Image: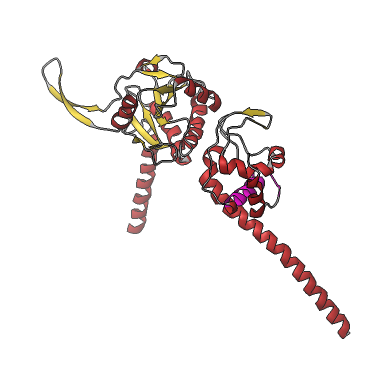
Amino acid sequence: MIKFKNIAIAGFSIALAFGLAACNNNKKLPFYGQREAKVIKDKDGHESIDTVYQTIPDFKLLNQDSVVITQDQFKDKIYVADFFFTSCTTICPTMHRNLKTVYEAYKDNPEVAFLSHTIDFKYDKPSVLKKYAEKLGVNTQKWTFVYGSKDEIYHLAEHNYLVAVQEDSTAKDGYIHQGWLVLVDKHKRMRGAYDGTKTEEVEKLKKDIATLLAEKE
Amino acid sequence: MRKTILFTVFWLTVAAIVYSCQDASEIEKAKYMSNGKDLYKTYCQNCHGENGEGLGQLAPPLTDTVFLKQNKAKLACIIKNGTNEAMTINGKAYQGKMPDFSNLHDIDLAQVIVYITNSFGNNQGMYDYQKVTADLQNCK
């Protein structure tokens, strides 16, 4: 009798756990980068602690049409950022092949955008980027390609998006870099990083975009 | 009776020899295919895709059997030396630069060519490394 009771309790607990998991609809993505605690005072003078997350700072870069773009373009949007160069024959084609499947999945959603930075400041001028976008077959209103000076782009990559990039004369194509696809939310905070060369991670990115879109503020 | 048995054994032996020879060439092709697949993954798949589908208009697909057949003698040169020639593949124009893979040896080129020309809907049989050596003499 006791045994039966134990089994019944165990079964009930398991069912309850599954039930709760199923109800858990307001799933949140993690926050990436540095964070700090900030003491804030409300109007009555009570102090409380708020967490400040790392954000992508303002930038000014030339897009594929040689027009300066800033973060205004990504206002009220979430976006996926990456670093590549057009003559790259190693990981970039795979990254963009995979990222294009994400683009296809969200191309009709005005709240989702894509931003690719070139790290080849010598060769990838805006006109080269434009040709690349045309050949890749994407709409540059949705998936923007940007060019900047070496200092600007490399600083953005390493300090803000936390992606390692480097000029390297010993590498076959002259540069080495990581293939992260970085997911940025509407408050410019990083909420995910996915290896763009792995299809299973890119599938996760697709799901996480849906989660992030559904997230309540 | 004895004669019949000897006769049967003789022809069976002949058949076995012929069969095993065919088998050997099949085994050779299978070897080319499996090594070719590894080489393809390492050097080609980034741009040309897992199923030879290409990438937009940046990299052409490898599914145009007619193109591959007509340009078979050029394939080794294209892979080894790279190219920036304009091409029409599956009726679409491609103008881009393919990098060189000069580190590949003749046998590697032969294996990857056999893999490509017998995958993705292509079925063009063997192409051995002596042929590659000969074709590379005629690169432009």
- Pick the quarter of the image with the N terminus of chain A: bottom left
> In the picture provided, is B108 more to the left or to the right than A32?
right
Looking at the image, which residue is at 62% across and 49% down?
B115
Q: Is residue A31 visible?
A: no
Q: Is A212 inside the magenta-drawn segment? A: no
Judge whether A45 appears above or below A98 on screen.
above
Q: Residue at x 43, y 16 (%)?
A: A66
Q: Quadrant of the C terminus of chain A?
A: top left
When the figure is inspected, residue A189 is found, relative to residue B37, above or below; the finding is above
Q: Nearer the viewer, residue B127 or B15?
A: B127
Q: A121 or B65, which is in the foreground?
A: A121
Q: Which residues are magenta?
A: B108-124
Q: Residue at x 30, y 24 (%)?
A: A56
Q: Quadrant of residue A75?
A: top left
The extreme bottom residue here reads B2
State how many labels appear: 0
Residue B28 falls in image quadrant: bottom right
Q: Position of residue A133 (x, y in %)?
A: 51, 24
Q: Toward the viewer: B3 or A39?
A: B3
